[in-house]
Amino acid sequence: MPTTSNRPPVPPFSAADAVAKVQAAEDAWNTRDPDRVALAYTPDSVWRNRDTFLTGRDEIRAFLAAKWERELDYALRKELWAFGDDRIAVRFQYEWRDAAGGHWRSYGNELWEFDAHGLMRRREASIKDVPIQAHERRIHGPRAPHEHGAALPLA
């Protein structure tokens, strides 16, 4: 597996670059493929995901594999919140069900920092899970291209 490769767009980000980076992340995460998703991070990337702290692609890959075994029918939406030269802030919502049949909507914010190759070297995520009824699900899979960039509802 390569350790360094360009992952366009690369910093410094324009508004269009930041939007593209957010959509690429959403698209990758919706594959639920931990190997593919882990390649977007530097080999020594550091994460805070809720109360879990990870370092490196191997830990990220293992974390994601366990996540998607636990969070069934996972479907995600991300929205650009702000950006700078090598940083992007997003808000997101995703929905999933647990093994007992409960349905959830998870709301959160992420802070991302990128290296010169466009790989994420730091990710901090704060997430809150809210129980919902199955009929309340509104995210059922990857976004259709005509929905890219659509704003997320607050609730």
Image (tube, rainbow, N blue to C red):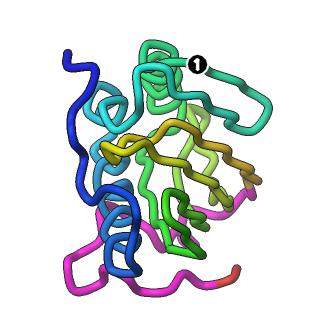
Q: Residue at x 37, y 64 (%)?
A: 140
Across the whole image, how many numbered discs are drawn on residues? 1
Q: Residue at x 22, y 86 (%)?
A: 146
Image location of residue 81, percent across then percent down:
59, 75
Q: Residue at x 42, y 56 (%)?
A: 75
Residue 144 painted magenta: yes
How many C-alpha atoms fall within 10 Å of the one at disc 1: few (<14), some, or many (≥20)? some
Q: Quadrant of residue 68?
A: top left
Residue 141 painted magenta: yes
Tell me the quarter of the image containing the C terminus: bottom right
**Along the horizontal axis of the image, is 33 left or right of 69?**
left
Q: Which of 92/124 is in front?
A: 124
**Along the horizontal axis of the image, is 59 left or right of 53?**
left
Image location of residue 25, percent across then percent down:
37, 54
Q: Which of 21/131 is in front?
A: 21
Please say if 10 is above or below 40: below
Please say if 141 is above or below 124: below
Image location of residue 70, percent across then percent down:
53, 29
Q: Which of 76/37 is in front?
A: 37
Q: Residue at x 54, y 62 (%)?
A: 88
Tell me the quarter of the image containing the N terminus: top left
Secondary structure type for disc 1: strand
Q: Quadrant of residue 100?
A: top right
Please say if 12 is above or below 52: below
Magenta span of residues = 130-153
The amino acid sitting under disc 1 is Thr
**Along the horizontal axis of the image, is 112 left or right of 108?**
left
Image location of residue 26, percent across then percent down:
37, 58
| Residue marked by disc 1 | 55
